[in-house]
Amino acid sequence: MSNQLSDRINSVTPSATLEMAAKARELRASGKDIIGLSLGEPDFKVPDYIKNAAVDAVNEGYNSYTPVDGYVELKDAIITKFKRDNNLNYEPTQIVVSTGAKQALYNVAQVCLNKGDEVILPCPYWVSYSDIVKLADGVPVEVPTSLENDFKMTAEQLEAAITPNTKMLWYSSPCNPSGSIYSKEELRELADVLQKYPQIIVVSDEIYEHINYGVTEHASMAEFEDMFDRTVTVNGVAKAFAMTGWRIGYIGAPAYIARATNKLQGQVTSGANCIAQRAVITALLESPARIEFMVKEFKGRRKLILELLNDIEGFTCNEPEGAFYVFPDVKAFFGRTVKGKEIKNASDFAMYLLEEANVATVTGDAFGNGNCIRISYAASENDIREAIARIKAVL
Ligand SMILES: *Cc1c(COP(=O)(O)O)cnc(C)c1O
């Protein structure tokens, strides 16, 4: 039977992180003791003050459709947050709330890209960027970076990647998967290049903003006056507030882009979940100091996993400054045959770790870097110790 699906969906690669998680679940169901370090999901409980706000919303009878772009009170809370944390001054017409930052990113691609428009993606990039771009008929243009430069794109690399077809630049800082953070100075250097190409819109994904270990201060591209009108700032509550399943993300954007995403969303999903929106008002208006306990905990785990990994010959790690992943270079293992299994590339390596060490990680190919794997340390210290000990043992 011939495949009757669209070329569009046939050209999409399934999310590698979700696939790895599914494979791990399958093996677990068959009785294997799998440690999952593949998903980017905090293992904390949602703090009580946020949970209580959701319970209150249920009891107060919030159940109707919400405004497509989000409750007015939530948009106000987002404006307050942008001003308080990022020194950004948005108007309500510039804010759109979506069902997770993922939908926000999808919306922006759909409303900004025409067929053949190029989107510059410094590698490694977040797993879904390239497929979200392809779904909008855009062309991902990968810019490789190096571990030596902490996986950051330089101004020269940006300029070399720009063509007359370049429409957008997308990056995350702190970066998933590398943990790198662009300093304000580094962003300024990129902005200086972009000044020569006024057609390029920037998507700055800042969802790990609060998960910052204090080496490089968080900075937003939109802070620069000459970039504000062409930057879409993306954020959400999934990572910093351990609210992955609540599905609330948002953008601050030029008003014409916000209006367009509002129109798109109105024909697709409508406004985001009412209870979650009410809870996020509380999450954003409370001081970020209330979630610092999670960051402290992640910091301890980062130290632990780096020590353990650096003790395995063949792993080369950068020191992540934010988020909760390490992205070690493992190419030293390529070409080796271990336990009768040939490891040709990062995918083979991740599969070897899953099958032999019962540890789920993700191949760097999914993030546009085939020399590395991504290991999440959003897991207990016990699991981290056991997982890395197992990896060491099978190598
Ligand atoms: C997790 C993640 C997202 C998606 O966030 P949701 O709000 O869960 O949709 C977007 N960007 C990056 C870099 C992420 O790691």
Image: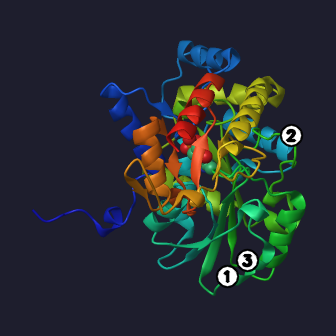
Q: Which residue is at 84% across, 53% downward?
A: 219
Q: Position of residue 249 (x, y in %)?
A: 61, 42
Q: Residues within 10 Å of mark 2 (few under 14, many from 20)?
A: few
| Disc 1 within 8 angstroms of ligand 1 (CB) | no
Identify the disc placed on residue 162. 1
Identify the disc placed on residue 157. 3
* Residue that carries the numbered disc 2 in the rendered image: 84
Image: 112 above or below 286: below
- Judged from the image, the secondary structure of the residue bearing numbered disc 2 is helix
Three-letter amino acid code at the position of disc 1 = Ile
Q: Quadrant of the N terminus?
A: bottom left
Nearer to us of marks 1 and 2 is 1
Among the two numbered marks 2 and 3 on one chain, the one whose residue lies closer to the N terminus: 2
Q: Quadrant of residue 32?
A: top left
Judge whether residue 98 can be spotted in this image. Answer: no
Nearer to us of marks 1 and 3 is 3
Q: Which residue is at 62% across, 24% downward?
A: 380
In the image, 13 versus 391, the foreground residue is 391
